[in-house]
Amino acid sequence: GAVVSQHPSWVICKSGTSVKIECRSLDFQATTMFWYRQFPKQSLMLMATSNEGSKATYEQGVEKDKFLINHASLTLSTLTVTSAHPEDSSFYICSARPKGRGLRTDTQYFGPGTRLTVL
Amino acid sequence: LAKTTQPISMDSYEGQEVNITCSHNNIATNDYITWYQQFPSQGPRFIIQGYKTKVTNEVASLFIPADRKSSTLSLPRVSLSDTAVYYCLVERFGGYQKVTFGIGTKLQVIP
């Protein structure tokens, strides 16, 4: 149990285009989902926190109009990078906290990550 | 949430026991400690979690002293496949608090 998937696993796009990344909790419902960004040889940096049915809470310095987060259901959150530029190239990772049902509700379960390269 | 401090890197030979210590001086009563493992280009993977004393599972042990201001992750008999970055996180009961990842400890296992 407690599997989180991300799609796509990698994406290459041209500068100025938008890219959508999906994060799904496959076998549990998630009260909260988190989006992180990780640059090479650096730690994970939290971008935003999203709860199902409400607006995401963005960290300081993260542009909410550029990184659109939609938490449509208890099993799906999407991150859209709008008008992507080369500096947005990074490894994007989502995580989800279970709603219950025998899993560790106080633990984040992470997705495998999405490698975004903007040319 | 409490800030964590870990060694940036550690080297170990195969078959040895590795102990990675994390400091979290400002940990609160309703906080607990979680350790994650991350391989390159993968998401972090849960290793172990604890509140106090000792916790053991099939892959690691976690030692937390009475004052809870530090914790030690113990990996028995490491292999080359344990080469990864290990993160110590302080998380709060209730599950709604965001967490901050520190720099992590890069463990290099040497043959």
Image (cartoon, helix red, strand yellow):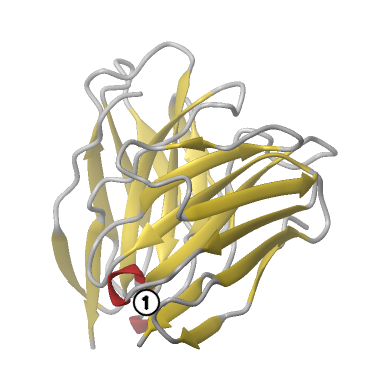
Residue A4, quarter of the rendered image: bottom right
Identify residue for label 1.
B40
Chain holding disc 1: B
Residue drawn at x 73%, y 55% as measured from the top left: A2
B45 in relation to A46, above or below? below
Compared to residue A83, the image places residue A47 above or below, namely: above
Position of A113 compared to B5: left or right?
A: right
Q: Position of residue B78 (x, y in %)?
A: 35, 71
Give the answer, above or below, for where A99 lies relative to A26. Answer: above
Q: Alpha-carbon neighbours of circle 1 within 10 Å: few (<14), some, or many (≥20)?
A: few
Q: Residue at x 33, y 17 (%)?
A: B66
- The residue under the point 47% across, 73% down is B42
Which is more toward the observer, B33 or A52?
Answer: A52
- Spot occupied by residue A72 in the image (x, y as percentages of width and height): 78, 48
Image quarter where the N terminus of chain B lies is: top left
Q: Position of residue A19 (x, y in %)?
A: 55, 73
A14 up-or-down from B90: above or below: below
The image position of residue B20, as x and y in percent, is 25, 51
Quadrant in which the C terminus of chain B appears: bottom left
Q: Of the residues shown, which amino acid type is indicated by label 1?
A: Pro
Q: What residue appears at the point 60 percent right and 28 percent down from the top-left corner?
A: B95
When asked about the image quadrant of residue B104, the answer is bottom left
